[in-house]
Amino acid sequence: MFLRMRALMLLTGVFCMLYFGLQPLTELYEAKTLVVAPEEIVFINTSECHVTGPRRPAPFFTAIEPVYKLRCRLPQLMIAISKGGSNVLVAKGSPEDLQCRYWLRTAEDFQPGKYVADGLFDLKHGARKEVTVGMGKQIVRVKCSTKMNETKYHDVHYFLPPPDPHSKPMSSPDKLSVMVLGIDSVSHMHFMRYFPLVKGFLEGLPHTKFFGYSRVGLDAYANIVPFLSGLSSIELQQNEGAWLFQGFSAGGYSTAYGEDSANAILAGKYGIPRQLTDFDLIPVMAEMDTHTRYSIDLKEMIHCTAGRSFKDVLWDYIGKLVPHMQRSPFFSFFWQSQGVEEYYEYASHLDLSYMMLLKSLLDADILNHTLLLLISDHGLRAGNYRMSFQGMREESQPLLVAIYPEWLKEKYPLAMDNFEQNAHSLITPYDLHVTLRDVLSLDQLQDGHIEVRNSSLWSCPPKKMPRGVSLFLRVPGHRTCDRAHIPSLFCFCRELTEVPTDDGLVLRCSRFLVESINKLIKPLGQCRQLKLKMVLLAHFLDFGEDSFVYELRLRVRTDPGGGEFEATVRLSDVLLLTSPISRVNHYLGQSHCLSDPDFKIFCFCV
């Protein structure tokens, strides 16, 4: 009996201990009402425009080859460093005896193939060697071969000497530096999907994501020119642009420009006068493109030089500029396009490198005196994902994230409050141009000045609203695509109503669209005239009940070549194109007889 009572008491004790001891844990795991994240994300939310999109669109895979396998396959035998005031090539352990030759160019010389000196040296198997080749800003091409004249190493290096060691880093800057990190063809939602590391890193920094950023032009050039010059790409042909590079240079800033391609966006007939920049990577990329470039993908759109991708060359260039950025105010513009233009999944391949780049800038204290814009020009412009309705929307919703120092909010509270409040406003590259003009005169951001400028802006009649509005002011909520100078094809503030593709009016407008293409290419001679094969998609654009404007957004397929084009056509007494004509599928070698990018997209060579 006694044993039974002891056993009962022991069981009771164990029960109480388990019940009361584990109760907090059971409460932790009890079913609770879950707060479900909204399925849609708000891009623009104003009185005139409300745009939303799916937070998690369906996964999509289009790559012909796995992007994670796209690695440079040749060895990287040398690095370039500045040492004791001299430019030095440091050779790693060579796999065999090699005979090397180098050619030197000045970094400011834009004429490819013009060398100021050359030289010879040998590399012994497994030996480390340092070769002094010159001093100052220089470009050097190195080619190493075996005794049988088999090339084992061919590369181009850029020497950028460090700043004066006696100069001191900026402590409390009275000027705000600007850095633009551009990624071609990445929409805001594409960034949300494929850059989780960058997104997480941003949470520890003062920043604003501008969900309502919209493109105003067809391609990268047509969107970057308004940002850097304040003019459209067409206006720039008749006017001399007031480039930001020149404005910042006149304001006492050093300037730098770099892209990961020799076919630079701003190197065309009406491009930026690059000789005005203090540091320029394009001559380096041109030397690589001519002598050492090779491709690593089937489409031959991603290039390497020796063991480095062109993107790695751009990253190395930025790293060499960091000591200069620590000591003086800087305006810098960097742009990456290789890979992201062609491959939907390639963005995931960049997440870690962009996060590490931002971390290096943070560690070097660059972000404490810099407004950094992580930006794109548009979403994917062609391919299978672009053919979907979501892809069509994302094309006109490029990425824009601004990172800024904490002291900026403390010193200019009203301006920065407006800046952050504009996160869901309808904004454009023209606004960014005016915003950076304000950075040149930070006194304009004092609360008193901002109040006066805000009052003037909001009292302005809608039809006289300026094309560019500084983001340090509150962008008016009654702004429309027309007032922001956004063509109909790029505007998603208007509701789209699908129309049958065999509708008579749709067919008439589609034939007009093809006729408009034929008028463009007819003077060229070497391009076939196109015929309408099929109307793929037609949408009616809703301008509101009070409007008497009627437009159709069309996607058509043409013969020969199967080109697929989109544009908007206004219905009036006469038909009128109200947007550029965009090609939304790849044309590969169909237009091999032309080099002008404005016409290549339309041309099927005779």
Image: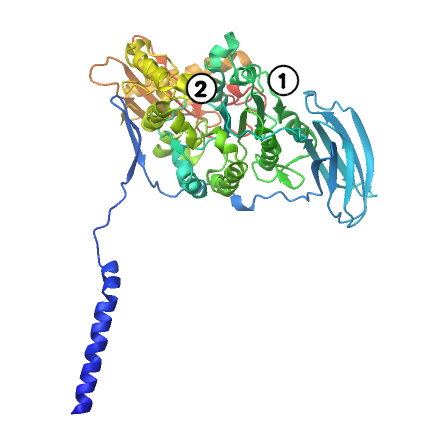
Residue visible at 58% across and 25% down in the picture: 256
Q: Is residue 185 left or right of residue 135?
A: left
Q: Is residue 506 left or right of residue 173?
A: left
What number is the disc on residue 521? none
Q: Is residue 396 visible?
A: no
Q: Nearer the viewer, residue 62 or 147?
A: 147
From what the image shows, is residue 412 above or below residue 30? above
Residue visible at 70% across and 20% down in the picture: 111
Alpha-carbon distance for marks 2 and 1?
Answer: 27 Å
Q: Quadrant of the N terminus?
A: bottom left
Residue 479: quarter of image: top left
What number is the disc on residue 442? 2
Q: Nearer the viewer, residue 82 or 499?
A: 82
Residue 243: x and y in percent read: 52, 15
- In primary-sequence order, the first of circles 2 and 1 is 1
Residue 308: x and y in percent read: 63, 39
Residue visible at 69% across and 33% down in the picture: 157
Residues packed near mark 2 inside 10 Å, few (<14), some (14 to 19) or many (20 plus): some
Residue 3: x and y in percent read: 20, 90
Q: Residue furthest bottom?
A: 1
Residue 590: quarter of image: top right
- SS category of the residue bearing label 1: helix
Q: Amino acid at mark 2?
A: Leu
- SS category of the residue bearing label 2: helix
Residues packed near mark 1 inside 10 Å, few (<14), some (14 to 19) or many (20 plus): few
Q: Amino acid at mark 1?
A: Gln
Q: Which residue lies under the disc numbered 1?
A: 275
Q: Quadrant of the C terminus?
A: top right
Observer-side mark, 2 or 1, equals: 2
